[in-house]
Amino acid sequence: MQNEKANVTDREISMVRLLDAPVKLVWKVWTNPDHIKNWWGPNGFTNTIAKMDVNKDGEWNFVMHGPDGTDYENKVVFRDIIKYKKIVYEHVNFPRFTATVEFEERGNKTMLNWKMIFENKDEFMTVVKKYGAVEGMEQNIVKLDHYLLQVAAAE
């Protein structure tokens, strides 16, 4: 069992953050295309969402538009959904990975645990070195945190 874990750590990105928003709001902005399009992706990216079916085996198809004008097509299949608790999704085009996002209620805050395990070490290294995936994930969480504050203030 320990070898299995060691084999994963060389192709995994994970981040844990305490978000200043209740779990129901965090869930809402993660699972509603009208919200997620506003914060998803690294700084400077925008999104066009064609489909987002947040159910087991449902698809999420979207294009991330980079600040340099490059479009990145994404196809995701949701593998496990436990409302207000967990989302497991598989990114089925390059780069191939499985992500687990766990939401833990902490009073009026939410502990977010987001883990991405890439299919192989080569894809992991490419996205980390060429595309700055670790920094991108950090920026994504900061954008989420800021967006949550905007939505909470508006509600």
Image: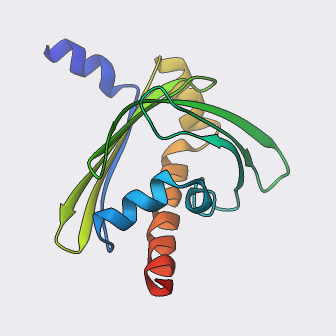
Q: Position of residue 34 (x, y in %)?
A: 61, 60
Q: Residue at x 56, y 57 (%)?
A: 36
Q: Report x, y in % for residue 112.
A: 30, 55
- Give whichever of 69, 31 is nearer the camera: 31
Identify the residue at image location x=31%, y=47%: 83
Q: How many marks?
A: 0
x and y, in percent, of residue 94 in the image: 63, 24
Q: Residue at x 48, y 46 (%)?
A: 134
Asked if residue 119 is positioned above or below residue 147 in the image, the reply reads above
Q: Nearer the viewer, residue 57 or 87?
A: 57
Left or right of residue 44, residue 90 in this image:
left
Image x and y of residue 147, in percent: 51, 72
Is residue 138 in view from this perspective? Answer: no
Q: Residue furthest right?
A: 69
- When the figure is inspected, residue 8 is found, relative to residue 12, above or below; the finding is above
Check the image and name the residue furthest to the left.
1
126 vs 86, left or right, is right
Q: As displayed, is residue 147 above or below residue 34?
A: below
Decide which of 72, 21 is in the foreground and name it. Answer: 21
Extreme-bottom residue of the structure: 153
Q: Is residue 84 left or right of residue 130?
A: left
**According to the image, what is the colour scheme of the structure?**
rainbow
Q: From this viewpoint, is residue 32 visible?
A: yes
Quarter of the image where the N terminus is located: top left
